[in-house]
Every structure is written in structure tokens, then in C-alpha cells.
Amino acid sequence: MSGPEVVRVAAPTERRNPASYDLDLLPTRDVLRLINDADRTVPGAVAEVLDAVVVAVDLAVEALRAGRRVHYFGAGTSGRVGVVDAAEIPPTFGSPVDWFCPHLAGGQDAMFGAIEDAEDDSDAGTREARTCVRPADLVIGLAASGRTPYVLGALREARALGARTALVAADPHAAARADVDLFIGLDTGPEVVTGSTRMKAASAQKLVLHAFSTTVMVRLGRVYSNLMIDLSATNAKLRGRMISILMEATGCPEADCTRALTAADGDLKIALVSLVSGAPVGEARAALARSHQQVREALSLLA
């Protein structure tokens, strides 16, 4: 009886790292130092692809302003990185929960356990994309190797449906770069533990996605200065944070910020525009509506 087919790979993430040949012989501190030294190279790899991330941000802003969505398709660690990034956006920026939609090969069960062969199922990616992707959405594939069948199946179908597509991979020369609208190829090189892409490759994808989604939220007006201004006061702690943000942003005393927030029915943006401009809450609300919820544009309307 023959065994499973062995696929030989040459992706950078699958090559052996000469610096860690004796990893299992090293003292604990030296293992940690070696891993840390390798991790230090990740921000540099991300810096090399920032121009491509700029394009991704512009595509996402365009899609979201048009009422479309951003999708992450991934498998294994790459997919989990996408799930975590998408999950953190609504509570951080008060965005609609369906703006960023993560799709993980194998479904929810794959978040905490390996689902055998899920990443090899190109048809599953195709079906998932066909179910949820619409024209003018932005679909981002996450694949350390750059060739995960589930991800590539989803990207092909998404493109056929009229969505814009991007691929984030830890192989700058991945063959699939020619099959997407935007390719973000990270040169993170071989892992300390051969093939363990939860290390540098995943760290690089996490940095890219966090920078990408945060910048999208900044461009959509959900940050004023460097302050989160789309919080919802769902508990006393968050209401206190909203007052603190108003005090930081306006320089007004706590009592004034509390009164403004109450008058604005708990809407931090309206209270902020009212306090900074000196306009009544009603005028602040109208200015934000005219400026598509952009605080600085609303302030310029009231100047």
C-alpha cells in the first residue's frame, strides 16, 4: 500500500536556516536570543512592501465607502492572523462588524485545531468566495507559501466575480503574484524552526494587516489626532475612557466634556466637534453628516 504523495517544496519559508542548525543543542537563553535576532528582521521586511500596502489601503477605503467589504481568506496560522485582525477592528474603532470578513479554511473549528487537508481544498475556497464576495469588494489572500490552494481558489473566484484581489505571502517570487491585482511579497526568509511559518512569516503578516486595517480606519475618519473616537459606551469603563479622550482632544475640563457627551446622546464624535468648534450639538451633528463623519472636515465647515 503506497503512502501519501510527498510534495517537494522550495518556498523560502520551507528552507533550512543555517543560523539554527544546532538549535536543539543550544542553551535556553541562546535559543531565545537566536529567535529574537530572527524576529528583528521582520519589521525590515514589512518596510520593503509599504508601497504595496498603500495601494491596499486605498482599495479598501474605496470599497468600504462604496458600501462594499474587505475579506481575508487564509489557512492555518495565516488564516488565524486574519481572523484576529478582523475581530479586533469593531471594538477598537466602532466599525460595522461586517466591514472586515475573515474566512478560515476548515471553518471555526480550524481556529483551535488542525483540520486535515482543509488548506488543500481549492474548491472550498471557490465555494466560500462565491457565497459571500460581491463585485467591488476587496479580497485579500493570506498564504505564507503564496500557493495555498484554498486561498488561491478563493482569489480566482473573487476576481471572476468582479472583486479586487490581493495576496500577502512570505515568498516575494510566488507564482500567484501574476494572478492578483496586488501582490505583497514579504522576504522573511527561512524560519528558525524549518517550515514553522507561525514564526517570522506570521509576524510579518500580522504587522502588515494591523498597519493596513488601522490605516484604513484612520482614512475613514475613525481616528482624530491619534485618539480613537468611534467608541460606544457599553459600560462604565468605556464611558470613562470617552470622557478622557474628550479631555485629551479638546483640553476642556471633565465637567464640560461630560455635559457635551450627555447632550450628544453619548456620541463622542458629536461631542468632540461641538467642544472644539464651540457650535451647539445639533450643528455639530449636521456638520458630521455633511462631511461623511470626518471630524476635521466637519470642523472646517463650522469654522
Image (cartoon, rainbow, N blue to C red):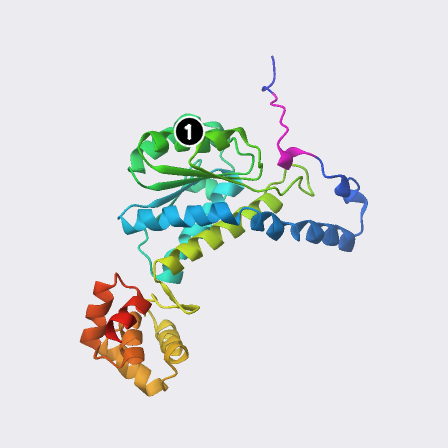
Residue at 27 percent of width and 48 percent of height: 66
The count of marks equals: 1
Q: Is residue 39 magenta?
A: no
Residue at 37 percent of width and 71 percent of height: 238
Left or right, 167 with respect to 45, comes to: left
Question: Crowdedness of circle 1 by 10 Å Cα count: few (<14), some, many (20+)?
Answer: many
Residue at 36 percent of width and 42 percent of height: 138
Residue at image mark 1? 153
> Identity of the amino acid at label 1?
Gly
Spot the residue most to the top.
1
Query: What predominant SS class does the magenta segment belong to?
Result: loop
The magenta segment: 6-15
Q: Position of residue 228 (x, y in %)?
A: 39, 67
Q: Is residue 218 above or below residue 184?
A: below
Nearest to the observer: residue 107 or residue 139: 139
Q: Position of residue 289 (x, y in %)?
A: 21, 64
Residue at 61 percent of width and 21 percent of height: 6
Q: Is residue 203 visible?
A: no
| Image quadrant where one finds the N terminus | top right
Q: Quadrant of residue 235?
A: bottom left
Q: Is residue 139 visible?
A: yes
Q: Is residue 177 above or below residue 86?
A: above
Q: Position of residue 117 (x, y in %)?
A: 50, 29
Nearest to the observer: residue 54 or residue 109: 54
Q: Position of residue 102 (x, y in %)?
A: 40, 44
Q: Is residue 173 above or below residue 243?
A: above
The local secondary structure at tag 1 comes to helix
| Image quadrant where one finds the C terminus | bottom left
Q: Is residue 11 magenta?
A: yes
